[in-house]
């Protein structure tokens, strides 16, 4: 008599987390909004330039147009004081704001993950010293550190490698682009502290597991154990915290640009556009409304997505 056998397909953490993420409506909403926003800021300026000839820096030569006009079919988000199309400037500003958030977060990931993993694995006095350094840096308001870095290394004191990079990408003597790269560097250097603590805590809970002991017994180097065996097992919390770091960095950049020490003309970010718009909010409210709403929608979406990923990757909520 033949026996009936059934094959049970296994699942993985990532497949399980993806299914759980799709059940979170706010997280799915945030994911969709971010996909649409990224596509819009990448191809939107080129489409506007092809269809209308407007760019983020184009100022109409006609004198009667050099003033702010309300939203219309020709300018869906209106124009600013110089007659520049706000839709084109919002999309270009989205490129800068998202790039600042993503690149600064990548810098903080590289520094924070490496620092936290080394401290957690080595332990002892080295771990104690490294984490006391983190505590000292935590005691200093990070926004103050960013302002000091931008003030000290801005202008004529710009590091040579930043000048070379901006000249390669944007052309000779592009001071505005150099300031953006300096902003990437400054924000990334102050965003890694919490990431280092998160990774250190994960490493402390993993470094005495059997797979680490087996790696040690087979003669695997310390570097390989940390970065090939331990760090990949911390990717869940790292990804979650990264999605929550991006909106935090974007908000900081917006604040700095609002103060006038962030992104410099001719470039613009959502923060600098909001700073320009608030000057005329009583007369031309659309100059503030559209950049502000776009930035708020993006920040909300990133936070919804981060919260959803945290819930999806939380091992306490997994169903075995």
Image: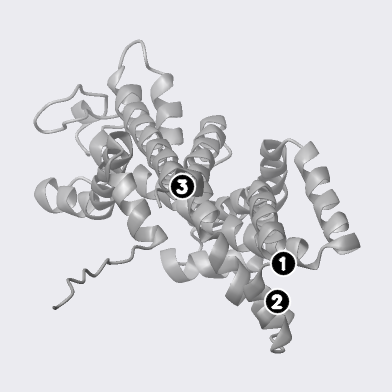
Foreground mark, 1 or 3? 1
Coordinates of residue 175 in the picture (x, y in percent) = 52, 55
Measure how far apart labels 1 and 3 are at the Cα level.
Answer: 29 Å
Q: Dots 2 and 1: beta carbons under 8 Å? A: yes
Mark 3 surroundings within 10 Å by alpha-carbon count, few (fewer than 14), some (14 through 19), many (20 or more) = many
Coordinates of residue 267 in the picture (x, y in percent) = 41, 46
User: Residue placed at 49% from the left, 52% from the top?
Assistant: 176
Label 1 element class: loop
Label 2 element class: helix
State the scheme by which the image is colored. one colour
Label disc, if present, on residue 208 of the rendered structure: 1
User: Residue placed at 66% from the left, 46% from the top?
Assistant: 194
**Residue 256 visible from this viewpoint:** yes
Coordinates of residue 293 in the picture (x, y in percent) = 33, 27
Residue matched to label 2: 213
Residue matched to label 3: 243
């Amino acid at each position: 008599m033949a026996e009936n056998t059934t094959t049970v397909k296994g699942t993985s953490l990532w497949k399980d987390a993806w299914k759980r993420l799709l059940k979170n409506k706010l997280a799915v909403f945030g994911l969709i909004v971010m996909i649409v926003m990224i596509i819009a800021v990448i191809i939107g300026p080129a489409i506007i330039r092809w269809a209308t000839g407007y760019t983020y820096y184009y100022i109409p030569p006609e004198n009667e147009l050099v003033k702010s006009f309300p939203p219309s079919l020709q300018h869906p988000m209106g124009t600013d004081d110089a007659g520049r199309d706000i839709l084109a400037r919002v999309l270009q500003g989205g490129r800068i704001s998202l790039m600042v958030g993503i690149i600064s977060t990548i810098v903080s990931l590289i520094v924070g993950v490496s620092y936290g993993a080394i401290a957690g694995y080595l332990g002892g006095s080295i771990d104690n010293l490294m984490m006391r350094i983190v505590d000292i840096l935590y005691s200093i308001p990070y926004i103050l550190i960013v302002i000091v870095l931008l003030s000290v290394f801005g202008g004529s004191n710009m590091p040579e490698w930043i000048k070379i990079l901006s000249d390669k990408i944007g052309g000779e003597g592009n001071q505005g682009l150099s300031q953006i790269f300096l902003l990437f560097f400054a924000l990334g250097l102050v965003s890694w502290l919490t990431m280092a603590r998160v990774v250190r805590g994960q490493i402390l809970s993993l470094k005495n597991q059997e797979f680490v002991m087996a790696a040690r017994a087979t003669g695997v180097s310390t570097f390989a154990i940390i970065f090939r065996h331990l760090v990949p097992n911390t990717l869940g919390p790292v990804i979650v915290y990264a999605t929550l770091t991006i909106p935090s960095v974007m908000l900081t950049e917006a604040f700095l640009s609002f103060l006038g020490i962030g992104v410099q003309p001719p470039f613009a970010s959502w923060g600098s556009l909001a700073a320009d718009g608030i000057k005329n909010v009583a007369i031309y409210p659309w100059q503030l409304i559209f950049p502000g709403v776009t930035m708020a929608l993006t920040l909300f979406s990133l936070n919804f997505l981060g919260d959803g990923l945290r819930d999806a990757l939380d091992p306490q909520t997994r169903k075995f």
